[in-house]
Image (cartoon, rainbow, N blue to C red):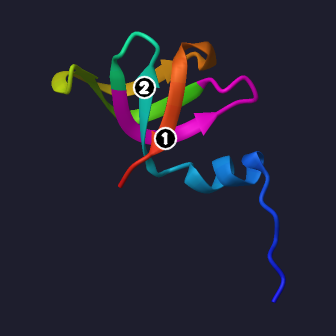
Amino acid sequence: MSLRKQTPSDFLKQIIGRPVVVKLNSGVDYRGVLACLDGYMNIALEQTEEYVNGQLKNKYGDAFIRGNNGYFHLYE
């Protein structure tokens, strides 16, 4: 059985359309569906919710987050 090595680009393509949490350096979290991202790790989310200290603050349809503002991870 051969295992195919996966590149970071392959992984990122697989998670488009899935729920993610984007944690900004400021501590604010954005939760939504990953619509797309580019080589600079700029992120576009759909059905976006903004959380501050774990509390829902705002809901946005679409959101664009610059790649240098934070990091993101999957959740389900």
Amino acid on which disc 2 is placed = Lys
Relative to 29, say whether 27 is above or below. Answer: above
Looking at the image, do the residues carrying marks 2 and 1 touch, with CB atoms under 8 Å apart? yes
Looking at the image, residue 60 sits to the left or right of residue 2; the answer is left
Find the distance from the CA under tag 2 to the CA under tag 1.
8 Å
Of residue 62 and residue 26, the one placed in the foreground of this image is: 26
Q: Where is residue 57 in the image (x, y as percent from the top left)?
A: 18, 19
Work out whether mark 2 precedes mark 1 in sequence or the reverse, and give the earlier one.
2
| Residue at left offset 65%, top offset 47% | 12
Looking at the image, residue 45 sits to the left or right of residue 60; the answer is right
Q: Which residues fall within the magenta stretch?
A: 30-42
Of residue 52 and residue 38, the one placed in the foreground of this image is: 52
Q: In which quarter of the image is residue 30?
A: top left
Relative to 27, say whether 22 is above or below. Answer: below
Name the image quarter holding the N terminus: bottom right
Which of the numbered marks, if any, corresponds to residue 73? 1
Q: Where is residue 26 in the image (x, y as percent from the top left)?
A: 40, 10
